[in-house]
Amino acid sequence: MNESSKIWMNGALVDWKEAKVHVLTHSLHYATGVFEGIRFFDTPKGPAVFRLVEHVTRLFDSAKIYLMHIPFTPKQVREGVIATAAASGLSEAYIRPLAYYDYGVMGLNPLPNKVSVAIAAWSWPSYLGKEAESKGVRCLVSSWRRIHPSILPPQAKATANYANSALAKVEAIKAGYDEAIMLNMDGLVTEATGENVFRVKDGVVSTPPASTGVLRGITRDSVITFVKQLGLQFRRNDFSREELYSSDEVFLTGTAAGVTPVREIDGRPIGNGKWPVTAKLRVIYGEAVHGEKPEYAHWLTPIRGGRTLTRRRA
Ligand code: PPE
């Protein structure tokens, strides 16, 4: 990975190499952590974090679902994100806040343990491979079903969900694909291992509703806004595997992946290889995150003037 210089741990910036946990850290054993993926981008006014408030709100919502008490306020975490971004010295990077049950008491009940928060920032320009953005990715429909909300809540961005994602991802990679798309227990399309899924058919853009068991992606929300701005028809509706195959366009959205076209699913080429709607949405997304769209300026938080909490590391 592309190391940067500092990591925010419980209120203080520590050296990257010093940001360590004990091997008996509770969340390492039982996947009881919640996290976020955020990006900051270069803009004409300097580096700025995209949709910071929404990401930090989702982190606290994820924690609430798990009855996890984060010992910082959302404002402190937002300031931590800004301080970490500023300390990285980078103009664009990925930011990973993580709240986890720390070292203390083993066993299935996480609650006796202290909750720690870490925030790291590093350069992560090509999440799905260097050619993904221009050429599109090849996806496999996974034999692993997406976690059902009665098993693990997909709305919580919890580390546990990613065991399911990792199984599907490894299956896809071993089969020679770039990414996996998962169905739910009813056979409906849900999401990819770390991205939401959209399809375009006969000019209508659609994405599965949250009720299918998908994470309510913040990039998904941004893209829905762009679709409406373009005057395109949009529906939040269920679709099946075969409808995915017969789409004119399919694309993935996520903080790490951005807006990435899908060129093939299970050996079937998607559309005619042109994907004009995806291309337009990619342009608008690129402009919005880079501060080139005044109507979306409120989604950007400048990182200049980032300050660290005065609290000492616990
Ligand atoms: N679904 C899943 C399962 C998911 O993990 C993500 C983000 C999304 C949808 C899109 O959400 P949003 O980023 O708010 O648009 N995946 C994060 C983790 C990636 C990773 O490999 O780690 C991300 O993109 O940051």
Image: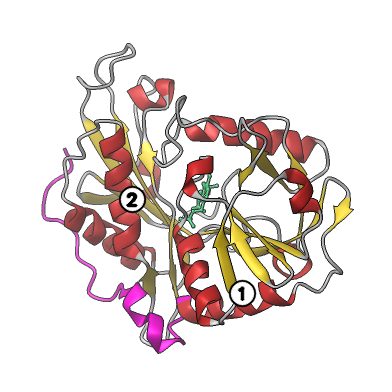
Q: Where is residue 175 in the image (x, y as percent from the top left)?
A: 82, 37
- Magenta stretch containing residue 293, yes or no? yes
Q: Mark 1 points at which residue?
A: 282
Q: Residue at the spot x=65%, y=41% of the render?
A: 188
Residue 240 lies left or right of residue 194; in this view the side is right
Which region shows up in magenta?
Answer: 289-314
Q: Residue at the spot x=41%, y=42% of the render?
A: 155
Q: Residues within 10 Å of mark 1 (few under 14, many from 20)?
A: many
Q: Position of residue 225 (x, y in %)?
A: 47, 72
Work out whether 252 lies above or below 24.
Answer: below
- Magenta stretch containing residue 197, yes or no? no
Q: Which of the 4 image quarters holds residue 303?
A: bottom left
The verdict on label 2 being within 8 Å of ligand 1 is yes
Q: Does residue 65 show up?
A: yes
Residue 178 lies left or right of residue 293; in this view the side is right
27 or 272, nearer to the observer: 272
Q: Mark 2 points at which residue?
A: 58
Quarter in which the C terminus is drawn? top left
Q: Which of the 4 image quarters holds residue 248?
A: bottom right
State the predominant SS element of the stretch in magenta.
Answer: loop
SS label for mark 1: helix
Q: Which of the 4 image quarters holds residue 34?
A: top left
SS label for mark 2: helix
Q: What number of labels is visible?
A: 2
Q: How crowded is mark 2: few (under 14 residues within 10 Å), some or many (20 or more)?
A: many
Alpha carbon distance from label 2 to label 1: 24 Å
Q: Residue at the spot x=27%, y=46% of the render?
A: 60
Please state which amino acid type lies under the numbered disc 2. Answer: Arg
Work out whether 84 lies above or below 27.
Answer: below
Work out whether 6 lies above or below 213.
Answer: below
